[in-house]
Image (cartoon, grey):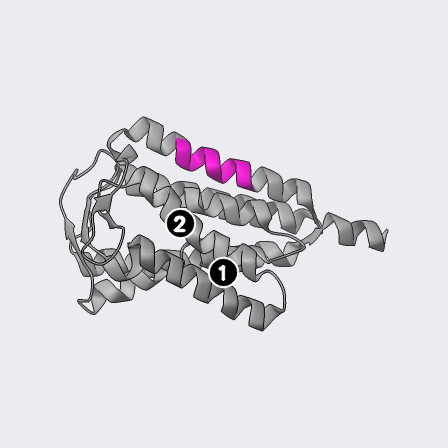
């Protein structure tokens, strides 16, 4: 899964956490995965049409995507966020773990339950129409909840939101229908750039919207 991960982040953004914080949380496992691939700690093969939805054979990623490590990173992120912001740690931890849950639905059986343990995955990526529909359904549902929970400060808020959602949609369609990356390192580097860009765009959206509770108090 790619942009579908962002749906839960948008759904809970507003008064409790910032959108860009949620964007980083839901992709934390992949943000860690990319440098681990670049360092040779984890491994991926580029196999054209390995699934109907993408070209990645994610055969070795125990330190980021095994169940036991997904729980570890989720708990750690929640504690760090709680210590930093004094609230929202439980939400951030849940968002981090949501990544593994959605990956379990999408991936082939490549997610270890523990180091050297059985690998699981329901393989929805092999049904591209269903997979893409799920990605966009989660994304749009999340942003609809964000729009209900927050109020735009003006036209800039609408523009920022459209740019972010359009960028996410374009990235998803390119990943599903575009050519495979030339090498695993390129895939990892592109992932890091994409996650950073979308977090920055989410921060732009944060700056153009206010929670409805705050808007009511101001009025």
Quarter of the image where one finds residue 63: bottom left
Residue at image coords 32%, 27%: 129
The residue drawn where x is 52% and y is 49% is 9
Residue 86 in the image: x percent, y percent? 63, 69
Q: Is residue 130 visible?
A: yes
Start and end of the magenta stretch? Answer: 134-142
Q: Nearer the viewer, residue 110 or 1?
A: 110
Residue at 36% in and 33% down:
132
Tell me if residue 19 is in the magenta stretch.
no
- Mark 2 = which residue? 99
Which residue is nearer to you in this view: 164 or 38?
Answer: 38
Dot 1: element: helix
Residue 135 place in picture, x, y as percent = 40, 37
Residue 139 part of the magenta-drawn span: yes
Number of numbered markers:
2
Foreground disc of the pair 1, 2:
2
Q: In the image, residue 34 lies at what x, y percent?
A: 28, 61
Q: Residues within 10 Å of mark 2 (few under 14, many from 20)?
A: many
Q: Which residue is mark 1?
A: 200
Extreme residue in the right direction: 219
Q: Earlier in the sequence, mark 1 or mark 2?
A: 2
In front: 120, or 134? 120
Q: Could you say where residue 182 lies in the image, as x and y percent from the top left?
A: 16, 53
Horizontal side, residue 140 vs residue 131: left or right: right
Q: Look at the magenta stretch and give its main secondary structure.
A: helix
- Image position of 147 (left or right of 23): right
Rendered residue at 28%/35% (across/down): 122
């Amino acid at each position: 899964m790619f942009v579908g991960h962002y749906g839960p982040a948008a759904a809970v953004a507003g008064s409790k956490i910032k959108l860009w914080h949620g964007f980083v949380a839901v992709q934390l496992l992949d943000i860690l995965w990319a440098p681990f691939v670049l360092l040779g700690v984890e491994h991926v093969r580029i196999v054209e049409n390995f699934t109907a939805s993408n070209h990645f054979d994610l055969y070795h990623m125990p330190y980021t995507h095994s169940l036991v490590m997904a729980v570890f990173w989720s708990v750690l992120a929640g504690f760090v966020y709680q210590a930093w912001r004094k609230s929202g740690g439980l939400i951030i931890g849940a968002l981090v773990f949501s990544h593994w849950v959605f990956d379990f639905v999408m991936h082939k059986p490549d997610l270890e339950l523990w180091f050297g343990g059985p690998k699981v995955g329901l393989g929805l990526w092999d049904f591209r129409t269903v997979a893409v529909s799920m990605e966009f359904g989660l994304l749009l549902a999340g942003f609809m909840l964000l729009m209900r929970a927050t109020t735009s400060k003006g036209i800039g808020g609408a523009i920022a939101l459209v740019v972010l959602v359009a960028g996410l949609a374009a990235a998803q369609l390119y990943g599903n229908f575009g050519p495979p990356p030339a090498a695993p390192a390129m895939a990892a580097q592109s992932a890091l750039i994409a996650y950073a860009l979308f977090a920055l765009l989410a921060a732009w959206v944060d700056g153009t919207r206010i929670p409805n509770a705050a808007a009511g108090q101001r009025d």
